[in-house]
Image (tube, grey):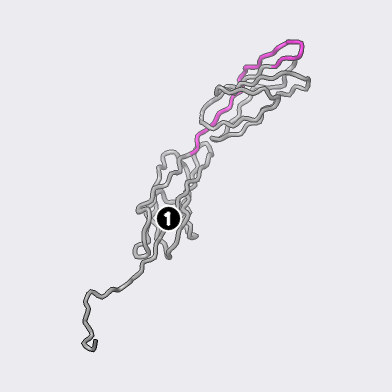
């Protein structure tokens, strides 16, 4: 059976969803190999590539009479890594008397980034120091992009606690009137 599957290259970021089509219209038996040890017998399968790497894709097609064609050309899927957007905060929690957080991450795999502090402020500094104006829990986000145009978002919750000033006397004077 004739195959309408040209040599091609598909590229994308981790967790890449690829829809494969073979272009045949006759009733055929399909066997796709995806280069990661998995296969499919569907005519037009969908495959999720979760890990970075280069995957050789192959297709074997057989008609009901047993005639078989293998396509193992240069059909490749290249999955690019996402940047690591893990966030480190020091301290991990604070109070309103010192509502300052030092933020950091590893920027070796990024070409651009933006910090969103959860209070309307943002920064493009690598490791910013941010001061909060009020108590509460704030969702801090770090959005990074790498040389492959792959993006990733890191997220943590940072809490600024209130301070309660309760005064308890440490001296007691008895009442002489009873």
> Which quadrant of the figure has residue 13?
top right
Any magenta on residue 75? yes
Work out whether 7 lies above or below 141.
Answer: above
- Which residue: 42% across, 55% down? 158
Q: Position of residue 146 (x, y in %)?
A: 49, 39
Q: Position of residue 53 (x, y in %)?
A: 51, 27
- Which residue: 64% across, 23% down? 40
Q: Is residue 145 left or right of residue 125?
A: right
Mark 1: few/some/many CA within 10 Å (<14, 14-19, 20+)? many
* Image quadrant containing the N terminus: top right
Give the structural element (helix, strand or loop) at label 1.
strand
Task: Give the farthest residue toward the right.
Answer: 26
Q: Position of residue 50 (x, y in %)?
A: 54, 32
Task: Give the farthest residue toward the bottom.
Answer: 177
Query: Observer-nearest residue: 87 or 64?
Result: 64
Total numbered badges shown on the rendered structure: 1
Label 1: which residue? 158
Q: What stretch is highlighted in magenta?
A: 61-82
Query: Observer-nearest residue: 68 or 107?
Result: 68
> Which quadrant of the figure has residue 84?
top left
- Which residue: 45% across, 43% down? 85
Any magenta on residue 129? no
Q: Position of residue 26 (x, y in %)?
A: 78, 20
Task: Give the farthest residue toward the top.
Answer: 66
* Image quadrant containing the C terminus: bottom left
> Which quadrant of the figure has residue 173?
bottom left
Query: Observer-nearest residue: 4 or 136?
Result: 136
Work out whether 124 lies above or below 58.
Answer: below
């Amino acid at each position: 059976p004739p195959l309408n599957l040209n040599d091609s290259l598909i590229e994308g970021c981790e967790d890449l969803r690829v829809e494969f089509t073979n272009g045949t219209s006759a009733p055929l038996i399909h066997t796709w190999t995806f280069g990661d040890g998995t296969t499919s017998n569907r005519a037009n399968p969908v495959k999720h590539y979760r890990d970075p790497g280069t995957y050789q894709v192959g297709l074997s097609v057989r008609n009901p009479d047993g005639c078989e064609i293998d396509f193992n050309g240069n059909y490749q899927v290249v999955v690019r890594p996402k940047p690591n957007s893990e966030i480190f905060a020091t301290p991990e929690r604070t109070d309103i008397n010192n509502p300052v957080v030092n933020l950091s991450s590893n920027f070796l795999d990024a070409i651009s980034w933006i910090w969103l502090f959860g209070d309307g402020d943002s920064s493009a500094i690598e490791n910013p120091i941010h001061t909060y104006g009020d108590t509460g829990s704030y969702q801090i986000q770090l959005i990074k992009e790498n040389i492959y145009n792959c993006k990733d978002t890191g997220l943590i919750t940072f809490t600024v606690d209130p301070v309660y000033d309760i005064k308890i006397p440490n001296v007691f004077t008895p009442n002489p009137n009873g």
